[in-house]
Image: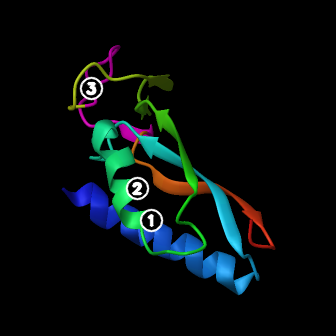
Amino acid sequence: MHEVRMMQSLLESAVKRAQKEGVQHIGLIQMRVGEASGVVPDSLEFAFDIAQRGTIIAEDAKLQVEYLPVRCYCANCNIEFHPINQIYECPECRQPHCEVHQGKEFELAFLEVSYFNL
């Protein structure tokens, strides 16, 4: 399950940043995850529970995830669209493999922190 490794990496980054800023407690971790990121949504919460163990400042943090749909852009037609399959074909001109503008994200968007231990 690659979600655990991805979540461990994300949490390590969050904890390092928090410690650098003098944070004592992370209460909320908000993420943005794209539909085409390769992450299985049901596995993400489980991976978070595993990854946060022993992090001390994030051990009882809550996770919020904003799931983003895939949005593609066709330069030929100058339109943005939600693809109906993984080929990302333009619905107007049928050009395959249009630019993906949204949907591959796996990112830390926001941390809710406190500078004292709760």
- Determine the secondary structure under disc 3: loop
What is the span of residues highlighted in magenta in the rendered image?
Answer: 88-102
Task: Give left or right: position of 43 versus 27.
Answer: left
Q: In which quadrant of the rendered view does residue 64 lie? A: top right
Above or below: residue 19 compared with residue 100:
below
Identify the disc placed on residue 97.
Answer: none
Residue 100 falls inside the magenta stretch: yes
Above or below: residue 96 compared with residue 105:
above
Residue 61 in the image, given as x and y percentages of width and height: 58, 57
Q: Image point 46% across, 66% down: which residue?
A: 10
64, 86: nearer the viewer? 64
Task: Kindly identify which residue carries mark 2.
Answer: 48
- Location of the C terminus (image quadrant): bottom right
Task: Kindly identify which residue carries mark 1.
Answer: 52
- Determine the secondary structure under disc 1: helix
Q: Residue furthest top?
A: 92
Residue 72 in the image, given as x and y percentages of width and height: 41, 32
Task: Kindly identify which residue carries mark 3.
Answer: 89
Sequence-wise, the earlier of marks 2 and 3 is 2
Measure the C-alpha gap from mark 2 to mark 1: 6 Å
Measure the C-alpha gap from mark 2 to mark 3: 34 Å
Amino acid type at circle 2 is: Phe
Q: In which quadrant of the rendered view does residue 113 lie? A: bottom right
Above or below: residue 36 compared with residue 5:
above
Amino acid type at circle 3 is: Glu
Q: Residues within 10 Å of mark 1 (few under 14, many from 20)?
A: many
Residue 92 falls inside the magenta stretch: yes
Residue 31 in the image, given as x and y percentages of width and height: 54, 49
- Location of the N terminus (image quadrant): bottom left
Label 2 with label 1: CB-CB less than 8 Å: yes
Numbered disc in front, either 2 or 3: 2
Q: Image point 66% across, 57% down: which residue?
A: 27
